[in-house]
Amino acid sequence: MASGTSESVPALTLRSHSADETRALGRRIGVSLVAGDCIALRGGIGAGKTVIAQGIVAGAGGGEDVRSPTFLLHAVHPGRIAVHHLDLYRLEMGTDLRVLGIDEALLDGAALVEWPERTAAEWFTAEVRLEIVSPVARDITVSIRQSRGRRDSLV
């Protein structure tokens, strides 16, 4: 679990007008991933959580064949840094991510967690919130906490 003191860093909100723009923002985040990063992906169904995950994985050196692991629960995408993609939609509130192996995964990899409200907020070092503005546009807010020695921005 993420440990140590954490302070909020000012959030950045951008408007995406297409899935390609959302993936491009994700790539910018993925390039900056370091071991121990655990990013909460927040947004309703169809908001673009999996689309931004595709970009993050690509930016971290993995492929773009990323699908929401709704039925798998946990998918691993190797690259410059391994990205663990978790989807908690089918799990109960209060799920302990250790049962999905997140503590070991964060030792040398990063994690993206869809439906993060189903687990403890202490796991997360950053949050990406996607809000539907129109059928194609999304407002994407990225916020990070300075923790685990991170002092830079994800974007």
Image: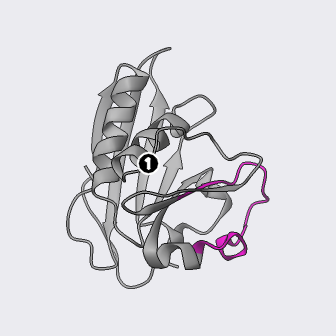
Q: Is residue 141 above or below residue 11?
A: above
Q: Quadrant of residue 125?
A: bottom left
Given residues 62 and 151, the one toward you in this image is: 62
| Residue 141 drawn at (x, y percent) | 36, 42
From the viewer's perspective, is 150 left or right of 39? Answer: left
Q: Is residue 153 above or below residue 108?
A: above
Residue type at mark 1 is: Val
* Category of crowding for the residue at label 1, using alpha-carbon neighbours closer than 10 angstroms: few (below 14), some (14–19), many (at least 20): many
| Residue 5 drawn at (x, y percent) | 35, 82
Write down the region rendered in magenta.
Answer: 84-102
From the viewer's perspective, is 38 left or right of 87? Answer: left
Q: Quadrant of residue 74?
A: bottom right
Residue 90 on the magenta segment: yes
Residue 93 on the magenta segment: yes
Q: Residue furthest top?
A: 135
Q: Is residue 139 above or below residue 142?
A: above
Given residues 124 and 21, the one toward you in this image is: 21
Residue at image coords 71%, 55%:
73
| Residue position for label 1 | 57
Question: Is the image coloured rainbow, by chain, by secondary structure, or in one colour?
Answer: one colour
| Residue 82 drawn at (x, y percent) | 47, 62
Q: Quadrant of residue 85?
A: bottom right
Residue at image coords 32%, 38%:
25
